[in-house]
Structure formats: structure tokens, C-alpha cells
Image (tube, coloured by chain):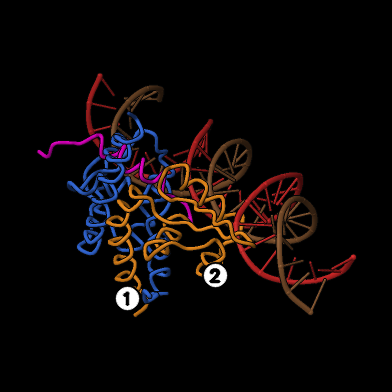
Chain colours: A blue, B orange, C red, D brown
Amino acid sequence: MAVEHPEGTVFVQTTLKVLGGKWKLLILWHLKDGAKRFSELKRLIPEITEKMLIQQLRELEKDEIVNRNVQSDIPPRVEYSFTAYGRSIIPVLEPLCSWGQEHLKRTEC
Amino acid sequence: MAVEHPEGTVFVQTTLKVLGGKWKLLILWHLKDGAKRFSELKRLIPEITEKMLIQQLRELEKDEIVNRNVQSDIPPRVEYSFTAYGRSIIPVLEPLCSWGQEHLKRTEC
DNA sequence: CACCAGACTTACAAAAAAGTAAGTACTTCC
DNA sequence: GGAAGTACTTACTTTTTTGTAAGTCTGGTG
């Protein structure tokens, strides 16, 4: 009989708490290939509202997954990027994306 | 300059649509080590309500991720298990769980 | 014949997440 | 001095998701 790992439940729930919701994984997906400005993210994810974008970025910042970098330009430019720790999410992100790709193929044909 | 993959967005969103929400990944986590009856799942995830459990199982069934197997016992027993296709989610589930574990370690100390 | 188990089902309510729309602050350009 | 760009902020509404509580059906068992 397989050994049960009750903690597995807790671990999955933890990830869900930190990365769950409609936007976070999407935002992180775009930060994967380098730092992005607020307005760039808005352009890359056109359906997101500014409110949601900031709200989610703030939460990711609080969880030390992304850095917020204010450049003292005029007008001010703010860049968001993965923290070193945040990069540990990439191995989660990638299979998740591939699965979506396969699932799309499967369902649209 | 990095090539942009606009589809990545769509793929991530697809996965989110199919596996998003509070319970699905958790249910799948438990099915990973073999078929489980409705009541077993309830016991393994005590915080879930029967309504949510069935609702999510039905959606997973519709998406061909889990099988529903009625045994003609009395009282009736219904077993849920991964479909062959559903098993393709395991490589998504595992990094997700490991990440949660690391994140927990990091935040609770 | 009342009661139990098991797997649901339903109507309704509450909570959480997301969206709308408008406004702020700063500064440069016309 | 008005418009425009950038990065927000706020009050409020809507939508979506989740939860509560009770009921259904079936066929044993005491």
C-alpha cells in the first residue's frame, strides 16, 4: 500500500495561495524573459486592468518573488523582475505552460 | 532581444481554466497514488464540502482528466481515478508541490 | 419500520476575486 | 496653460467561486 504524505496537501495549498488567481502566473510568465515595465506588462496582457496588475505585482513583491525597481527618470519608469528566489518558480511555470499547450491541441481538433 | 511567444500566455491561461480554483489540484494530488472513492477523498480533504468535491470531480471528468467508476455494490461505491490523459498532469503537479514545500520552509523560519 | 451508509442534488447565502471609472502626482512638450 | 505620458490609487459594483444546510434515492440491518 502506498505511503500517504499528508503534507503534500499542505504544499499544494501553499502554492495555490501564493500563485493562485487569474493573473499571477501570467505576469510571471512574461517576467521570465527579463525585467518588464508596468506599461509593458499592460501591453503584454491587454485584458488585465491596471488595478489588477498592480495589486498582483504588490502581492508578488510582498512574497519576495518579484523586485520593484524605480528608475529616477522623468517620467518615472518602474521595472519589475524576478528575484533570485522568484526564479525558482520557473520550473513550475514551464510544465504548466506545456500542459496547456497539449491540452489546447487536444481540445481544439 | 528575446523572441516573444504570445502563445505562452494562452497556454498558461488554458491550464488555469482547467485546473484553477481551490480544489482541483488538491483532488488530483490525492488521485496520484491510485483510485479513490468519493468518501475517501472527503476524508483526505476534510475541509472540502461534498458539493464542491462532486462539482470539481464532474468538471475533471468532463475534461477527461478523471474516470468515474461505479461499482454495483450495495451501498454503491464510486471510484475516481486518473485517465491516461489525466496522468499527463503529474509532471505539473510535482514541481508545484515541491515549490510549495520550499516556500513553506522559507516563510515559517 | 426506523435507521444507517454512500453518493449525490438543490436552493440559497456569503465571501472572495475581479472589474469600472474616475482621479492623483509629477514633469516635459507644444 | 493645456495636453500627454507614466505609474499608480480609490470608491464602488459586478461576477465568480465557495459554503451551508437540508433533502433524495437505494437497499440492507436490527
Q: In the image, which is nearer the foreground, mark 2 or mark 1?
A: 2
Q: Dividing the image into 4 quarters, which one contains the C terminus of chain B?
A: bottom left
Q: Which percent across, then down, holds residue A52?
A: 43, 45
Residue type at the position of mark 1: Lys
In terms of depth relative to the viewer, which is nearer, D23 or D7? D23
Q: Quadrant of the N terminus of chain B?
A: top left
Q: Quadrant of residue B102?
A: bottom left
Q: Residue at x 26, y 58 (%)?
A: A89
Sequence-wise first label, 2 or 1: 2
Q: Residue at x 41, y 44 (%)?
A: B64
Q: Main secondary structure of the magenta part?
A: helix
* Residue B105, disc: 1
Q: Secondary structure at mark 1?
A: helix
Tell me where the magenta segment starts and ends, as one range. B1-22
- Which label is found at residue A2? none
Residue A33 versus residue B99 in the image, above or below: above
Does C27 sit above or below residue A56?
A: above
B76 in magenta: no
Q: Is residue A37 above or below residue A93?
A: above
Q: Are marks 2 and 1 on the same chain?
A: yes
Extreme residue in the left direction: B1
Which of A17 and A103 lies nearest the eye of the viewer? A103
Residue that label 2 marks: B43
As displayed, is residue A70 above or below residue B31?
above
Does the stretch in magenta take in B19? yes
Residue at position x 20%, y 36% from top? B5
Please tell me which residue is depicted at 38% across the width and 75% down the height of the picture.
A1
C-alpha distance separating marks 2 and 1: 26 Å
Residue B51 spot, x, y in % from top left: 61, 54
Q: Say left or right for A2 vs B23.
A: left
